[in-house]
């Protein structure tokens, strides 16, 4: 596993409000335990996305969704703000963008699938 992937997952886990609150109140060991659990869970999602043939990431107005067969991981954030989906796409998981088109010229210049 690349250290960059782990760094992103650890930073994301440490930034959650629950872990921040635990650290603020002095419960750092508990916060670290929750962060480790979160990183391990997210690594499992990334491994599933890499191995399942029907796994894909969808980004739309309603948020970002990681579809992993029977499991869906979602958030109400665009792909740029959802590190797990961004990592899955960077590692080769198919990406479906259903956000509305605002620049018609850029859309017309996209490569075509033959």
Image: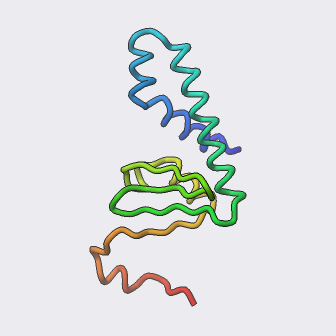
| Residue lying at the far bottom of the rendered structure | 114
Residue 48 versus residue 41 in the image, above or below = below
The colour scheme used here is: rainbow
x, y (%) of residue 92? 63, 62
Between residues 24 and 60, which one lies in front from this camera angle? Answer: 60
x, y (%) of residue 110? 44, 82
Name the residue rendered at 57%, 63% in the picture: 56
Q: Quadrant of the N terminus?
A: top right
Q: For residue 62, what is the image quadrant?
A: bottom left
Left or right: 5 as drawn, with respect to 106:
right
| Residue lying at the far front of the rendered structure | 70
Name the residue rendered at 31%, 75% in the picture: 101
Residue 114 versus residue 42 in the image, above or below = below
Q: For residue 6, what is the image quadrant?
A: top right
x, y (%) of residue 35? 55, 27
Name the residue rendered at 55%, 86% in the picture: 113
Left or right: 12 as drawn, with respect to 70:
left
Q: Quadrant of the C terminus?
A: bottom right
x, y (%) of residue 86? 51, 54
Residue 62 versus residue 19 in the image, above or below = below
Name the residue rendered at 47%, 63% in the picture: 58
Between residues 106 and 39, which one lies in front from this camera angle? Answer: 39
Residue 100 versus residue 69 in the image, above or below = below
- All told, the count of numbered labels is 0
| Residue lying at the far top of the rendered structure | 26
Between residues 49 and 3, which one lies in front from this camera angle? Answer: 49
């Amino acid at each position: 596993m690349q250290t960059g992937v782990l760094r992103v997952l650890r930073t994301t886990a440490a930034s959650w409000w629950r872990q921040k609150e635990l650290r603020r109140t002095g419960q750092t060991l508990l916060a670290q335990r929750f962060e480790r659990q979160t990183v391990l869970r997210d690594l499992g999602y990334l491994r599933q996305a890499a191995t399942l043939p029907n796994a894909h990431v969808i980004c739309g107005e309603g948020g970002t969704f990681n579809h992993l067969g029977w499991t869906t991981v979602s958030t109400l954030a665009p792909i740029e703000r959802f590190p797990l989906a961004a990592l899955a796409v960077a590692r080769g998981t198919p990406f479906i963008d259903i956000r509305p088109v605002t620049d018609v010229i850029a859309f017309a210049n996209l490569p075509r699938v033959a």
